[in-house]
Amino acid sequence: VLNYSGGTSMATPQVTAAACFIRSINPGLNASAIKNILTETGYQNINGMAAPEELGGRVLAVDEAVMRAIDERPERVETNTDTTCPDV
């Protein structure tokens, strides 16, 4: 049995999960950069049909977004190896 559900109640957890996944791949990305990646890589049509406006006019393409996040990672990331807690 397939049911159709839409709207922000369905989109919010999916977009949030995609954003978290992208951030885990490239922690250097800020919220604005992640939003741009998700928007720019989202599909505007599905099998030749425009994505419905209630879907924001785009459908997530997490695979494309992940590839973009990987491409935008710096060559080398410096990490802090000091494991002591800072004084508060």
Image (cartoon, rainbow, N blue to C red):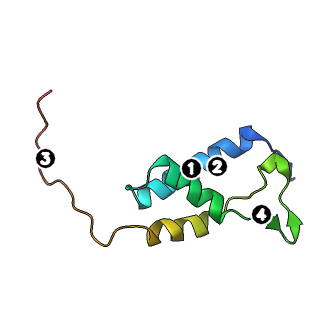
Q: Which mark is residue 14?
A: 2
Q: Which mark is residue 17?
A: 1
Total labels drawn: 4
Which amino acid type corresponds to the residue marked 2 in the rendered image?
Gln
For marks 3 and 1, the one nearer the N-term is 1
Corner quadrant of residue 41: bottom right
The reply, left or right, for residue 52 in relation to residue 81 is right
For marks 4 and 1, the one nearer the N-term is 1
Label 4 to label 2, Cα distance in Å? 17 Å
The reply, left or right, for residue 65 in relation to residue 77 is right
| SS type, badge 3 | loop
Residue 53 percent across, percent down from the top left = 84, 50
Residue 80 percent across, percent down from the top left = 17, 53
The reply, left or right, for residue 27 in relation to residue 16 is left
Q: From the image, state whether disc 4 or disc 2 is nearer to you.
A: 4
Asked if disc 2 and disc 1 are in contact, CB closer than 8 Å, the reply is yes
Q: From the image, state whether disc 4 or disc 3 is nearer to you.
A: 4
Which amino acid type corresponds to the residue marked 1 in the rendered image?
Ala
Residue beneath disc 3: 83
Residue beneath disc 4: 44
Asked if disc 4 and disc 2 are in contact, CB closer than 8 Å, the reply is no
Outermost residue to the top: 88
